[in-house]
Image: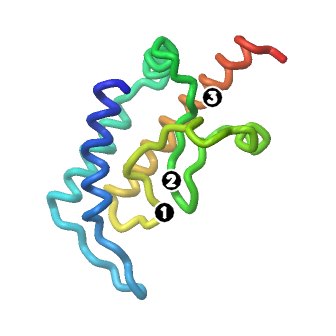
Amino acid sequence: MSPRHAYLAMIALPLLASCAQEDAGVRVRMRPAEEAALARLADSLAALDPATELRHALAGGDRRFVAVCYAACEPIGVADSVQARLREGDTRVVSGTSDNVVSKGQRRVNAAADTFALRYNRLLLRELRQQSPD
């Protein structure tokens, strides 16, 4: 795991435990510190270069796809036929993504995660096809 991925995981896990929830249509406001943490997470994700991250991952033997979690955790941009062959542990989840969008910060995290995961997974698919063209 790269230091940046470890950093993102350290930020996202406490954040998930403290996120405001919508209950019966009542929107609860997030505290400024939580919103700021989401903004930092979104900025960190947006700053990652998928090609560079993929090179580091492959150099370390990591051939997993990147997944985001909404209703389910899925690798974005990966065909259903490929997803059907994935086993548990074949994906890395971007922590902090959620289908329970309670703020602008959460929307930014989701958008940055989607963009990163889509580009990363497309590059990984291309690399895997070049290694095993069958």
Quarter holding the N terminus is top left
Query: The residue tagged with tag 3: helix, strand or loop?
Result: helix
Q: Is residue 71 above or below residue 20?
A: above
Q: Which residue was labeled with disc 2?
A: 69
Q: Is residue 121 above or below residue 58?
A: below
Q: Which residue was labeled with disc 3?
A: 122
- Quick one: label 1 or label 2, which is nearer the N terminus? 2
Q: Position of residue 33 (x, y in %)?
A: 15, 58
Tell which of 122 and 9 is nearer to you: 9
Question: What is the spatial separation of the Cα atoms under label 1 and label 2, in whole angstroms?
Answer: 7 Å
Horizontal side, residue 125 vs residue 114: left or right: right
Query: The residue tagged with tag 2: helix, strand or loop?
Result: strand
Question: Extreme front residue here?
Answer: 88
Q: Which residue was labeled with disc 1?
A: 99
Question: Extreme left residue here?
Answer: 33
Q: Is residue 65 above or below residue 49?
A: below
Q: Which mark is residue 114?
A: none
Q: Position of residue 51 (x, y in %)?
A: 49, 19
Amino acid type shown at disc 1: Asp
- Quick one: label 1 or label 3, which is nearer the N terminus? 1
Local crowd size for mark 1, using a 10 Å CA cut-off: few (<14), some (14–19), many (≥20): few
The structure's colour scheme is rainbow
Q: Are the residues at dot 1 and dot 2 in contact (C-beta closer than 8 Å)?
A: yes
Q: Position of residue 130 (x, y in %)?
A: 72, 12
Q: Position of residue 16 (x, y in %)?
A: 32, 58
Amino acid type shown at disc 3: Arg
Amino acid type shown at disc 2: Cys
